[in-house]
Image (tube, rainbow, N blue to C red):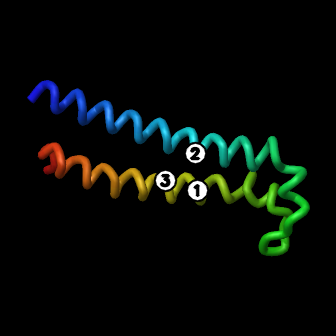
Amino acid sequence: MEKNLKEYWSKNVTFMSVLLVIWAVVSYGCGIIFVEQLNAVRFMGFPLGFWFAQQGSIYVFVCLIFIYYIYMQKLDREYDVHE
């Protein structure tokens, strides 16, 4: 049982780390680093770099929360730790 819990938390932390890296790349990369290149494209009347800095990273974060929820439901059932 102890080994299963360590494996469960290892998968949880690994997946959470991947999601946080995605969020950081979108937030920092699209909103700050690649803003000049993205501003050449317009989205809903605004430069795309501005849109990512103001709203896009929040939308991505909310989507990542749902992805994490779905993954954790599956992982909880797999390791029989669901409620």
**What distance separates the C-alpha of mark 2 from that of mark 3?**
9 Å
Check disc 2 and give the amino acid type.
Ile
Q: Is the residue under label 3 in contact with that under label 2 (CB below 8 Å)?
A: yes
Answer with left or right where residue 25 lies relative to residue 40. left
Q: Nearer the viewer, mark 2 or mark 1?
A: 2
- Residue 60 position (above or below residue 80): below
Q: Is the residue under label 1 in contact with that under label 2 (CB below 8 Å)?
A: yes
User: Which residue does the image show at 31% across and 31% down from the upper left?
Assistant: 10
User: Which residue does the image show at 17% across and 51% down from the upper left?
Assistant: 77
Give coordinates of residue 47: x percent, y percent: 85, 63
Answer with left or right where residue 40 lies relative to residue 49. right
User: Which residue does the image show at 76% across and 48% down from the upper left?
Assistant: 31
Q: Is the residue under label 1 in contact with that under label 3 (CB below 8 Å)?
A: yes
Answer with left or right where residue 54 lies relative to residue 4. right
Q: Residues within 10 Å of mark 2 (few under 14, many from 20)?
A: some
Which label was assigned to residue 60?
A: 1
Rendering quarter of residue 67: bottom left
Q: Secondary structure at mark 3?
A: helix
Q: Nearer the viewer, mark 2 or mark 3?
A: 2
Q: Which of pointers 2 and 1 lies earlier in the amino acid sequence?
A: 2
User: Which residue does the image show at 13% across and 25% down from the upper left?
Assistant: 2
Identify the residue position indicated by label 2 in the image. Answer: 22
Q: Residues within 10 Å of mark 3 (few under 14, many from 20)?
A: some
Q: Specify the farthest residue to the left.
A: 1
**What distance separates the C-alpha of mark 3 from that of mark 1?**
6 Å
Identify the residue position indicated by label 3 in the image. Answer: 64
**What distance separates the C-alpha of mark 2 from that of mark 1?**
9 Å
Q: Nearer the viewer, residue 49 or 4?
A: 4
Q: Specify the farthest residue to the bottom.
A: 44
Rendering quarter of residue 28: top right
Q: Nearer the viewer, residue 80 or 51?
A: 80
- Residue 69 position (above or below residue 5): below
